[in-house]
Image (tube, helix red, strand yellow):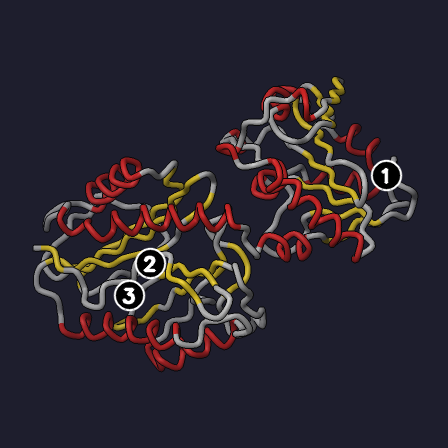
Amino acid sequence: MLIVNLCYCYVTYQFMNDFPKEEFISRIEKIQIHIEKKNIDAVIITSPSNFRYFTGLDSNFWESPTRPWYLIISKKNPIKAIIPSIGITAMQNTLVNDIETWESPNPKDEGISLLKKNIKSFPKNSNIGFELGNETFLRMSINDYQDIQKNLSEYNFVNASKILWSIRKIKSEIEISNIKEICSITSKVFDNFPEKINLGMSEKQITSIFKKELIEGGADYIQYMACASGLNGYNQIICNPTERVTKDGDILIIDTGATLNGYFSDFDRNFGFGRINKKVLDAYNKLWEATERTLEIIKPGTSCSEIYSKLSYSLTTNNISVGRMGHGLGLQLTEPPSIMKNDKTLLEENMIITLEPSIEMDENKILVQEENLLITKDSYKLLSTRTPENLPIIN
C-alpha cells in the first residue's frame, strides 16, 4: 500500500483541460453543505462521471472495467481518493492531496480493505452514502459492496444519488461555456451537411463524413452516434449505422453525442433523399410546430411534466410511447430530469435540457427531432441551431 499526501503548493495543477481549481473546490463545498443538511457523514463515489465532476480526472481509462476507483467526500475532511496504483501520477495532477493506492488487478481485494479502514474512521452509526439511486451506479463489484454492508453492519449505508444530481443539474459558467461550444460545433456540421452527402451513400459512409467534420470542427470525441434510415421514415433511433444504402424516398436521421472537455451535445437532424411522400413532410412539419409551441412555455418554474403535456397535446394521437421526450444534459449524454408525464421537476436557471418529441406515421415508421436548451433567468436559450423548418432534401 502506498499513501501519498501532497500540498497544493507542490502540485503542478493542470488537468481537465485547465479548468480552474476553484471550480472543483466549489463543487466539493456544495456537496459538503448538502450532506451536512441530510445528516450524511460521507459520500463514496465510484462512477466515472461523478469522479470526474469532483476531481477533474480526464481519462478514458474507465473503459477498462478491471479496476474500481473510490472517492470519499465527507462533511468536513478533505476529499480523499483510494485508487489503483496505476492511477497515482494522474491523480496527483488533481486537487486531491490525500491518496491511497493498492496494486491492481487484485481480485481478492480490489481496494476493499482500504475502503473499510476509511469507513471505520467515522463514528459507528454514521450514515455513509453510495450511488444507489436512479441514473447512477456502483462501479465496483456488487459482492464487494455486499461484503462491506455485512462486515460493517454498525454503519448505515444510504442512497446519495439525489444529492449528487441536485448539485449537477445546475451548471456552472464553465460547464455552460463548454456545452455551448460543443453544441455550436455540432450545429455547424449539421447545418452544412446536406452539401457533403449524396443519394446512394450508405449510413456508414454518411456518418463517417459526419464524424470527420465534427473532429475537424473542434470536437474531442464522438461518444455516441446513432443513425437509421428507411422509406418514409425509420423504425428506431438508438443503433449504430449500417451498410444500408440510401434510396429515393428515404428519411435518414443522425443523432449524435459529441464531447468537448467531457461535456456533451445531444441532438439529431433528419435528411430526406429524392422524392419524399407528402405524409412524411406533413409529419415533419407537425413535429417542428409542436416544438415551436412548447418553447413558448420554457422558463424557470415550468415542470417537466408540463413540457411533456404540451408536446403530447400538440402531437395528439401521433405521439409514440418512448417513455419521455427529453432529458438533462452535461457530463453524460442523458442526465436527470426527464421530460415525462410523471416527472414534476421544476426547471431552474442554468439547467440544460433537451426537447425530443417523436411522431409515428405508420407502424414502425417514426420521425424524431431534438433541440438543446439552456434555461435562463426568465426564459431559455437555444444551444443547438433550430431544426430546419422544412426537411432538407438530398438529391
- Please name the residue shown 29% across and 41% down the image: 214
The C terminus lies in which quarter of the figure? bottom left
Q: Which residue is mark 3?
A: 367
- Please name the residue shown 49% across and 70% down the image: 378
Q: Secondary structure at mark 1?
A: helix
What is the distance, in whole Å, between disc 1 and disc 3 at their CAs? 52 Å
Mark 1 surroundings: few (<14), some (14-19) or many (≥20) residues within 10 A = few
Q: Nearer the viewer, residue 234 or 61?
A: 61
Residue type, numbered disc 1: Asn
Residue type, numbered disc 3: Leu
Q: Nearer the viewer, residue 321 or 16?
A: 16
* Mark drawn on residue 270: none
Labels 1, 3: front one: 3
Q: Which residue is mark 1?
A: 151
- Is 354 on the left or on the right of 159, as rendered? left
Q: Residue 350: horizontal and vertical position, in percent?
A: 52, 59
- Is 76 on the left or on the right of 286, as rendered? right
What is the distance, in whole Å, between disc 2 and disc 3 at their CAs? 9 Å
